Image: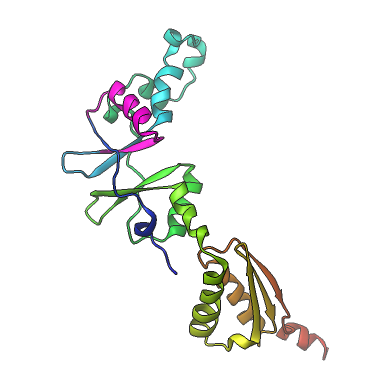
């Protein structure tokens, strides 16, 4: 299994135009129970993203009118103050938007979400046109794979076909997505590479490396010193 963003994304996307008003966006967030949505131009190209945090800036950073002392508002970041004064999606959105492509890997999308601390990413095609959206929950569906599927991929696809090694050399067990690997690889490099590859099998939660590694060449050379 090598799931891509296209396999888990949602095709029906709640999006707004750049001229959408603050009230319209707030209402759509409530109506569709989403935390953010893409901002698109007239051709449905993604030009930014508006999140609930962006909308909250108007309430939280509205200066003295929101009960915040002027001295405090003076040290606020200029961009935050601009958002507090924003009236439309174009004013409030974060741009350029961070997006992913349908053919991107689940790992790539997850890494972006984790690094940027965002809950969802717009999915665009090669022309930048909106084709879907992917959320954290969507990415976690890869962990729905059962242990038998994970075991079969490791043994048949990874060990046998990719590494061209007899699977009988290893004992692989999978329980609740946790993989335990036992055996004696011919070289330490083979063992380390195999464990690294298994960690990237979709659905694997963790890998317990119980391989018996051969002594390194440096260790063997030390015996003769």
Please name the residue shown 43% across and 54% down the image.
109
- The C terminus, quarter of image: bottom right
**Vertical order, 223 against 38 (above or below):** below
x%, y% of residue 52? 41, 30
Q: Please tell me which residue lies in front, 118 or 219.
A: 118
How many numbered discs, if any? 0
Extent of the magenta region = 19-39
Q: Please tell me which residue lies in front, 117 or 82.
A: 117
Left or right of 208? Residue 73 is left
From this viewpoint, is residue 78 visible?
no
Please name the residue shown 38% across and 25% down the image.
55
x%, y% of residue 110? 47, 53
User: Most extreme residue toward the left, as rendered?
Assistant: 42
Q: Is residue 28 covered in magenta? A: yes
**Vertical order, 29 against 174 (above or below):** above
x%, y% of residue 6? 34, 58
Please name the residue shown 62% across and 62% down the image.
176
Left or right of 173? Residue 132 is left
**Vertical order, 46 against 33 (above or below):** below
Q: Please tell me which residue lies in front, 20 or 217.
A: 20
From this viewpoint, is residue 177 visible?
yes
User: Most extreme residue toward the bottom, as rendered?
Assistant: 224
x%, y% of residue 97? 33, 43
Quarter residue 92 falls in: top left
Left or right of 174? Residue 96 is left
Please name the residue shown 24% across and 27% down the image.
20
């Amino acid at each position: 299994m090598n799931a891509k963003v296209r396999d888990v994304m949602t095709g029906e996307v709640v999006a707004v135009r750049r001229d959408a008003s603050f009230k319209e966006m707030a209402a759509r967030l409530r109506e569709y129970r989403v935390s953010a949505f893409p901002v698109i131009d007239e051709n449905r190209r993604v030009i930014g993203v508006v999140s609930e945090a962006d909308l909250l800036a108007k309430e939280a950073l509205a200066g003295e009118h929101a009960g915040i002392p002027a001295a405090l508002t003076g040290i606020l970041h200029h961009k935050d103050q601009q958002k507090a004064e924003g009236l439309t999606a174009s004013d409030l959105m974060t741009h350029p938007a961070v997006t992913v492509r349908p053919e991107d890997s689940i790992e790539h999308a997850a890494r972006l979400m984790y690094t940027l601390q965002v809950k969802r990413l717009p999915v665009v095609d090669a022309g930048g046109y909106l084709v879907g959206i992917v959320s954290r929950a969507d990415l976690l569906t890869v962990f729905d794979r059962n242990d038998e599927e994970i075991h079969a991929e490791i043994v048949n696809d990874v060990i046998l076909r990719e590494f061209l090694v007899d699977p009988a050399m290893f004992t692989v067990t999978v329980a609740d997505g946790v993989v335990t690997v036992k055996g004696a690889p011919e070289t330490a490099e083979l063992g380390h590479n195999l464990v690294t590859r298994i960690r990237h099998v979709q659905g694997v939660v963790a890998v317990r490396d119980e391989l018996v590694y051969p002594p390194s060449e440096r260790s063997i050379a030390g015996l003769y010193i």
